Every structure is written in structure tokens, then in C-alpha cells.
Amino acid sequence: QSVLTQPPSASGTPGQRVTISCSGSSSNIGSNTVNWYQQLPGTAPKLLIYSNNQRPSGVPDRFSGSKSGTSASLAISGLQSEDEAHYYCAALDDSLNGWVFGGGTKLTVL
Amino acid sequence: EVQLVQSGAEVKKPGESLKISCKGSGYSFTTYWIGWVRQMPGKGLEWMGIIYPVDSDTRYSPSFQGQVTISADKSISTAYLQWSSLKASDTAMYFCARQGDGGGAFDIWGQGTMVTVSS
């Protein structure tokens, strides 16, 4: 059971906009920033969004993040087949004194 | 190029010891924390712990405290994850990752080391 809660799956058709939610508590998302990672099949995770809504260099602006209270979300617009991957949210947890991840959401592009 | 390169896949028996490595290059290794993340087969990511190579200050997830040891040798820009007595339940992919400047996110990841523990 992960500390951060994500839906196990999401889907969309090419060109659509999809959102993935991440729910936490006051000790993690409520008091710290959220990062998002993308893991393509058989590869290492890649940083997609940091500090709630910042994109590292090279990440397309189709990807955006937001946070409100103890929840965060990742939005992907103009969905492409290469976006098919697992997506994980993460945040520092002040009670656990370390990082916690969501259980991951598998995104399928139909 | 900034990168973390991990040691190769391992196959071990229960009760054996193991030490895997993660070598950083292309940046000042001592300036950034290095974390370890476990991914069991078909499962999600779990943070294990983190080390600051300049002074080996180490923090562990409560779930992994006492189960593994994280260390680093700053002279060769390498971090380590070790077990003294492996269990079948340690079978997993292990990633090292650099904790970068942006909100402490893990911005550079190693390619992963698959550890298989089987009798």
C-alpha cells in the first residue's frame, strides 16, 4: 500500500488530454512539493515534472503539473503513442523523513 | 554527459552477501545526494535511502533500515548498496538516482541493476 494514492490505470486516444491524480496527506503533499516520473517499458524512470509544475529541459510542454492542498495532478495534452508508460508521483514525507512514491499509473494510448 | 552507471545483473542464493555499485560522471559527485530505489517485479517504485558522498551522511527508509547498507567512496565517485544476507524477497531491480537542484527531485537515474535471489 503506497503512501501516495494514484489510479492504477488511465487511457486516452491520440490527441486527447488526460490527467492523472495523486492523493496524499498533510505530511507529504500538503507540506512539500510534488515530482512526477515517467517510466517507459523496460527503462529507468525519467524526471518529468519537479516542484509541482516545473519541466526539466527537454520535456515537452504537453506535460504539466499542478498541486492543491494534499493532492496533485499530471496533465498530458495532445496524447501521443510514445506517452504510453507508467507515471509515478513522489514527495518528501515529513513523518517518514524520506521520499514516498505513488503506486504508479499505467497510461494506455488507445 | 551527466550519468550514473550501475553494475551488472546479479544472480545469488539466499543467505549470500552482495554489493552493487553506482558510478557518477560528468558532474561533481560530492555535491549531490544519491538515492536508491527498489522496483520489485511488476510493481512500483520504493525509496530505500540516500547518501551524501562528501561526508557519507546516510538516511534510510524505515522499511529498509537494518536490511541494507548504503555507502559511498567519493574518491572514485561511486555509491554502493549492499546486503549481508539476501532473501528471495530481495529479488528486484535497483536504481540509483541523483537528487538534483530542482526541489530535490531525482533528476538523473542509473540504468538499474537486476538482482535475482533464488536457490
Image (tube, coloured by chain):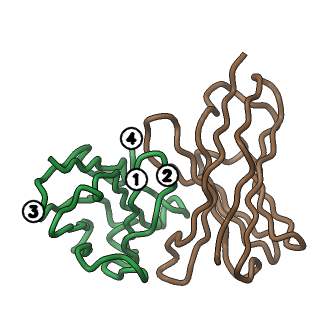
Picture coordinates of residue B107, whole percent (x, y): 52, 72
Sequence-wise first label, 3 or 2: 3
Sequence-wise first label, 4 or 1: 4
Q: Residue at x 64, y 76 (%)?
A: B2
Residue B20 at least partly seen: yes
Crowding at dot 3, Cα within 10 Å, few <14 / some 14-19 / many 20+, comes out as few
Task: State the separation of the CA atoms marked 4 and 3.
Answer: 30 Å
Identify which amino acid the numbered label 4 is placed on. Gln
Task: State the separation of the CA atoms marked 2 and 4.
Answer: 23 Å
Residues tagged 3 and 2 counted as in contact (Cβ below 8 A): no
Identify which amino acid the numbered label 3 is placed on. Gln
Labelled disc at residue A40: 1
User: Mark 4 vs mark 1: same chain?
Assistant: yes
Residues tagged 4 and 3 counted as in contact (Cβ below 8 A): no
* Of the two numbered discs 2 and 4 in the rendering, the one whose residue sits closer to the viewer: 2
User: SS at mark 2?
Assistant: loop
- The residue identified by callout 4 is A1
Sequence-wise first label, 2 or 4: 4
Residues tagged 3 and 1 counted as in contact (Cβ below 8 A): no
User: SS at mark 1?
Assistant: loop
Picture coordinates of residue A12, whole percent (x, y): 12, 53
User: Mark 3 vs mark 2: same chain?
Assistant: yes
Give the letter of the chain under mark 1. Answer: A
Labelled disc at residue A16: 3
Q: Nearer the viewer, residue B4 or A90?
A: B4
- Extreme residue in the right direction: B75
Residue A75 in which image quadrant? bottom left
- The residue identified by callout 2 is A43
Q: Nearer the viewer, residue B105 or A33?
A: B105
Question: In this image, B16 relative to B33: left or right?
Answer: right
Which chain, by letter, is green?
A: A
